[in-house]
Image (spheres, rainbow, N blue to C red):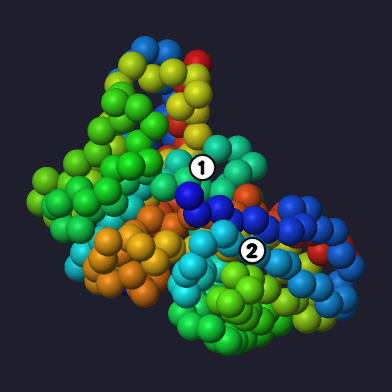
Amino acid sequence: GAGVSQSPRYKVAKRGQDVALRCDPISGHVSLFWYQQALGQGPEFLTYFQNEAQLDKSGLPSDRFFAERPEGSVSTLKIQRTQQEDSAVYLCASSLISGSTDTQYFGPGTRLTVL
Amino acid sequence: ELKVEQNPLFLSMQEGKNYTIYCNYSTTSDRLYWYRQDPGKSLESLFVLLSNGAVKQEGRLMASLDTKARLSTLHITAAVHDLSATYFCAVEALDSGGGADGLTFGKGTHLIIQP
């Protein structure tokens, strides 16, 4: 079956622009996660949804970052007034159930470059 | 704050040799994950370790978990070039408040296997 998909795969933005990154989780997966991966580093947790509810947004680095999952399926991560330090790969992951023993399956990521 | 440390961070080894990657974490947890990442690609789930003493094997890779020592190992047996990648361990905090939670990743071990 289809895995987690993300679009766009690459995004170049000028400093100050707003961007929106999309994630399509595996069909039927309850949990959805966003991570930020800087070059040469491990992914860092940003936020987590269980269905449409955003249960944890403790990892969002600033109030310029906003995520939503209005119908409990597709999610969008929005970054307002982008800064150079926002340049990273943004990974989306989904898991089948809300129990914490389930594997998170990752999408291919969106590489964001802010000039 | 949960911290996850991997060592070594870089490893170059010859085909046919054995080696072990170590993953230490700072707080109580009994859920540990190993992922593989190829350059420019997303993360591929390798192992999920859910209890003290858990051992899982897939091909030339074997992972184990010691929750008392807060240590997991990923052992590579008779390495082959195709295993060249970056390997991440990730831990989920126990006190997540119920339900799935974001993972805390190590910095990754960049493994190069030379013919």
Q: Find disc 2 in the rendering and name its residue.
A: B24
Q: Find disc 1 in the rendering and name its residue.
A: A37
| Element assignment for label 2 | strand
Q: Specify the label residue A63 is tagged with.
A: none
Give the residue at x 33% y 53%.
Answer: A33
Q: Position of residue A46 (x, y in %)?
A: 37, 43
- The answer to whether any part of residue A29 appears in the image is no
Q: Nearer the viewer, mark 2 or mark 1?
A: 2
Give the residue at x 83% y 77%.
Answer: B18
**Mark 2 is on which residue type?**
Asn
Bin the neighbour count of mark 1 within 10 Å (Cα to Cα): few under 14, some 14-19, many 20 and up: some
Give the residue at x 39% y 66%.
Answer: B94
Front in this rendered view, residue B62 or B26: B26
**Which quarter shows the N terminus of chain A?**
bottom left
- The answer to whether any part of residue A70 appears in the image is yes
Check if mark 2 and mark 1 are on a common chain. no
Front in this rendered view, residue B28 or B111: B28
Q: Chain of mark 1?
A: A
**Mark 1 is on which residue type?**
Gln
Give the residue at x 58% y 77%.
Answer: B68
Q: Quadrant of residue A36?
A: top left
Left or right placement of residue A96 versus residue A45 in this view: left
Bin the neighbour count of mark 2 within 10 Å (Cα to Cα): few under 14, some 14-19, many 20 and up: many
